[in-house]
Image (tube, coloured by chain):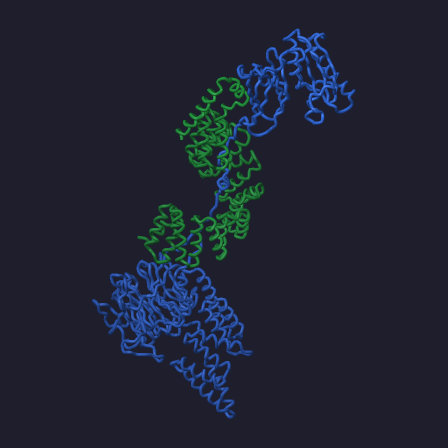
Chain colours: A blue, B green
Amino acid sequence: MKKYTQNITLALLLIFVFSFESIIAQNIDSTQVEEVNDTTQVVEKKAKVKKEKLSDTTKLILNYIKSGNQLFDADMKRYDKAIIAYQKAEELGDSSEVLYYRIAYSYFQLKEYQSSAEYLKLVIDRDSITEFKAYYYLGRIYHLNYEFDSAITFFEDYRKSLSPDELNTMSKKIKKCIKECEIAKEMVANPVAGFLDILDTNINTPYLEYAPIVSTNDSLLFFTSRRPGNIGSGRDHNGDYFEDIYFSVKDSNGNWSMAKNLGKPVNSSAHDAAAGLSADASMLVVYRSNGNGDLYISKREGDNWLKPKKLNKFINTPAHEASASFSYDNMNLYFSSDREGGYGGHDIYKSSLDEKAKWGLPENLRSKINSAYDEMTFVAMPDGKTFYFTSNGHNSMGGLDIFKITYIDSVWSDPINLGYPINTPDNDVLYSLTADGARAYVASSKTDSSLHDIYMLTFMGDSKSVSDNMDGELLAFRKYGAALPEMDSPVNIQKLNLTVLKGIISDEFTDEPIFAQIELTDNSTNTVVATFNSNEQTGNYLVSLPSGKDYGIAVKAENCLFYSDNIVIDKTKGYKEIVKNIKLKRIEVGSKVVLKNVFFATGKAVLTESSETELQNLLKLLNDIPSLKLEISGHTDDVGKASSNKTLSEKRANAVVDYLLKNGISKDRLVAKGYGEEQPIANNKTKDGRQQNRRTEFKVIAR
Amino acid sequence: MKKYLLLTVAIVLSGVLKAQTENSKDNVLQDTVKVLTKKDKQVAEKKYNEGVILYQSNKFDEAISKFDEAITVKAKFPEAFYNRASAKFGKKDYLGAIQDFNYAIILNPIPKYYLSRGLARYNYKEFDGALSDFAISIEKDSGDYRTKAYYYQGCVYFEKESYDLAIKSYSNAIESDASYAFAYHDRGSTYRKMEKYQLSLSDYRKAIQLSPKMAIAFNNMGSVKKLLKDYQGAITDYSSAINLDSNYAVAYNNRATVYKEMGDFKNAMFDFSKAISINPSYAIAYSNRANLKFQKKDYENALKDYDRALELDPDFGYGFLNRGICKEMLRDNDGACQDWSKANSLGVSVAGEYLNIQCN
């Protein structure tokens, strides 16, 4: 789960290195390389050597450089004006490395980093270079601009340019710069969740606002501003107004009222800055710049703040005291001082009220908090265990950062960097929290050109992350729908592909309907599949037959010769009707019947099995009428030799006679005759005709 | 429906009567036809067969009315009860299906019928009844129904989160039929639930080996690889699933979550949108796309996607959690708290923590 990013603007880029008179005014930019006097000498030396031969232009250039140097080197630095003088020299043709470096350095001091970087690049792009510090300042600028990898490269380049002696003094500083860049990279990649909202114009103006201090109940806000209307109307050499303390109260709607100057006697004609507030908002710590920077306390009496009283000599020393704050019970005062005997730079000290209600001998808060660098502010939370402080040591990501530390069971935890974007590569100081820890007030600058304003930071609690949902059926049958029951198959139904065979059975000569028995044989199995009768009155018969079979039909009636026929029904689909009217012959001498269901093997006189039913019918006829005598005759078509046909027909007639004899019919009742092709009943020129002519017949010769 | 049936019967009867009077002189006809075609006895079968055809085209309602007709004509017709049950099953009327399977089993207690009733009970979430039916199928059959009963037994145990028993059942199914890809696949899913990811991958692979076009196995294999943070492997598997089934919205959704994890927001956005275009009511894909927009700090548009997801699925707990977080970023604290409250009531416990800390 990745931390989700917060809504805090990323435009905290290039926050000014505070030009605040209070707190960090006293050379606390430990990363700065102060070393420009050499160059002054170089410039002027160069001018001296060539003095006699100078042209008017060169003289002019030298004059501009000289006046630039005066502004650059003065106690009251005027880098803005120095730049104007130097740039006139540049316009007249001076493109020396020293000139470019000084312009770049001036811009850097004015926090105009982009311009500074342009001139620094002109320095490092030269064929030969002596102002190696250009690498360092480029590193600083890239660091402040969140381009950490480039910054590291420039710091490395600077280290490579140094002589062993220089390296001795500088290597620690360069190492810290690189470490800060690495920490910054990580912190920017893992930001803290929260919202940063700028306070409205009741608090913020186009001038500087910073050092917000909020009462623990979030109802009273003090801050320091350098805006017109300050007490004494004093301005510094840059034209900026002196610091004064302002305050605002929160109305019932939760809005901060129009900020007011806290007025005399808290604000004086000098710099007056808010440095700390007691938890009960009864005491305000004020920083004043007189002397070397000292701390005062103003007490509240009703709505009035009384004249600030300077803290005693344990607190204020000839060193620089930057800020102070109270413990929740007002019994301890924590303050920052760069007095001797500390861990380096400014350290945080704690002083407790003694029995006479005086601030006693302070103790250094030691190495968990105090580093070799500067610790500038310290805020105690109401729980008595949680503290916040600002430092440019520890694992700062650049300049001063805000750290959290706890003191539980007499043990200090390791300080925790509050992370980006509360902290930035630049100085982040005077962090003020509400008692519930839900909100904090900080001073920030949104762009590199605007001045600091007061922001409210709302923490979002634990970091939250939206979670994606993976998806997909885990059980295969659910995806592929195989879970439907396996259906029972269709049942077999007799096909309706039937053929109806119907007709009328009548007397051949009288046409009278005959009541006859109809026998249907499946010739493939030689079994009788149905026996039924024709209608007595009408002679009608009707039979439905499954298609695709070869049937034998035999019709018998009293006093009639039986009739037989062979019907092949195709596998046609649907309903089909075959009309077959059958004429039966009376049993009279001379009547002839073709035995249509008597079959022989091709070209032979061997009866096939499918002839059985028909022969049985013939047998039955002879048994039923014992007086009956028959001539059995064989006939062929006219294909082939007449003599062979005759022989074959004779043999076939004998085969039938033999069958009957074997079945008990006496020899004198039967005559076998072979007529060959002599007695055709159809035209031999057609296939169908020839088929009809190939036949076995019987003829009644006696009854 | 019953009226209609009675009417049909009446028409048929009157037709028969009419035919009889017409042919009163001709008894031969009746007898003959009866002998050869058995025409009258097959009304139920014909209706049944019509029902089967309708069932096969998933026309369940029409199929059911054909089976109704068949059963009206012939009450002891287990196949008709069975298939009517199956058609009700197809309509997800599991209770109705169970009742018809009961009749079918009374008439013909065969393993296949028990298996099917088990499935209906399973879908009706009557897990114990389902397990008992599967057990009977396993006992009575030695072939395919036994194998399938093992498989579905595994599925029921999976649903009951009895993963050890599920593994046993699936393994039995595999023992009965070594080429049972579904059983391998589902055993893989069970191992995944047990966080035995390597065994899971191995079973998914086996399923694919047996059934190379089984897109779901590729998809699930991808998801296991995602859990193992083998993002490249996951992308490959999801892509294989998509190659097999270009309309596989789930695989697009899942691949997108991996692209997102890899920081490839462009492809992630494309895949989420593709999943949504394939299935416009895919709530999860909307919610996931919203998460991506959220990550890109496009909170306004993220909110729109969350809204759509929750419109589609009002019980989507994580959707509410996520939308609440989005609303917080839009500084809508009250809205955020309402959503977390809803998410909490839908069982997303982390939402409860947010509620406690930030919503008084």
Q: Nearer the viewer, residue A445 or A681?
A: A681
Quick check: can you spot residue A624?
yes
Task: Classify A657 as above or below A423.
Answer: above
Q: Residue furthest left?
A: A302
Residue A493 at x, y percent in the picture: 53, 27
- Image quarter where the C terminus of chain A lies is top right
On the rendered structure, is A316 left or right of A576?
left
Residue A627 at x, y percent in the picture: 66, 6
Q: Nearer the viewer, residue A662 or B307?
A: A662
In terms of image quadrants, where is residue A451? bottom left
In this figure, what is the number of numbered marks? Answer: 0
Residue A666 at x, y percent in the picture: 70, 7
Q: Nearer the viewer, residue A72 or B105?
A: B105
In terms of image quadrants, where is residue A231? bottom left
Task: Classify B171 as above or below A418.
Answer: above
Residue B258 at x, y percent in the picture: 49, 52
On the rendered structure, is A124 left or right of B323?
right
Q: Nearer the viewer, residue A313 or A160?
A: A160
In terms of image quadrants, where is residue A382? bottom left
Quick check: can you spot residue A372?
no
Q: Residue furthest front?
A: A510
Task: Classify B342 as above or below A51.
Answer: above
